[in-house]
Amino acid sequence: MLAVEDLTRAKWNCLHFALPEEAHSTRAELASRGLAVFDIDGGTIETKDQLLSALAQAMRFPDYFGMNWDALDECLRSMDWLPSDGYVLFFKNAESFWQKSSHLAGMFTEIWMAAAEEWGSREIPFHLIFVW
């Protein structure tokens, strides 16, 4: 179960799993508390380029984003272009994404977790919610 209070704090557990109805109400509450909230649809993502493009668009990455894993890591650790009290990404249709592209899902999760550790050291929430 998603707890809004957990998502508004920097915590070691930055990965979460939720059902769509739970994610919908949580998303609205987080946005009302001043966190930057993003959504992507994993149901159509099958390639690295599709994943990086979806992330860049949803999270409003700057034009210099290089469309590679290193650039993703750099952007997720910075977010200078979008200052906020915290960041939460809702990854919808995650089950489909994991089934079609588990290697991409694993790499993305690893990069997210490394960035979340850095944000946590600054006490800024940085969470990823896989919506099943």
Image (cartoon, rainbow, N blue to C red):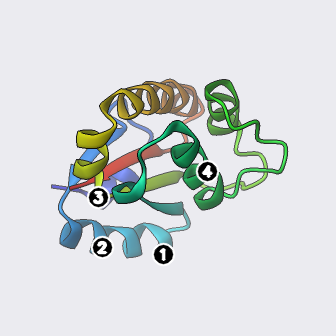
Query: What distance separates the C-alpha of mark 4 from that of mark 1?
Result: 27 Å
Query: What distance separates the C-alpha of mark 4 from that of mark 2?
Result: 23 Å
Given residues 118 and 111, the one toward you in this image is 111
* Residue 122 at x, y percent in the picture: 60, 32
Marks 3/1 in contact by CB < 8 Å: the verdict is no
Residue at image position (63%, 34%) is: 72
Callout 2: helix, strand or loop? helix
Work out whether mark 4 precedes mark 3 in sequence or the reverse, and give the earlier one: 4
The residue wearing badge 1 is 32
Marks 4/2 in contact by CB < 8 Å: the verdict is no
The residue wearing badge 2 is 24
Instruction: Pick the quarter of the image with the C terminus.
Output: bottom left
Work out whether mark 3 precedes mark 1 in sequence or the reverse, and give the earlier one: 1
Tell me: 74 left or right of 47.
right
Q: Amino acid at mark 4?
A: Ser
Indicate which disc residue 53 carries: 4
Callout 3: helix, strand or loop? loop
Please, is residue 14 above or below residue 33 in the view? above
Work out whether mark 3 precedes mark 2 in sequence or the reverse, and give the earlier one: 2
The residue wearing badge 3 is 93
Marks 3/2 in contact by CB < 8 Å: the verdict is no
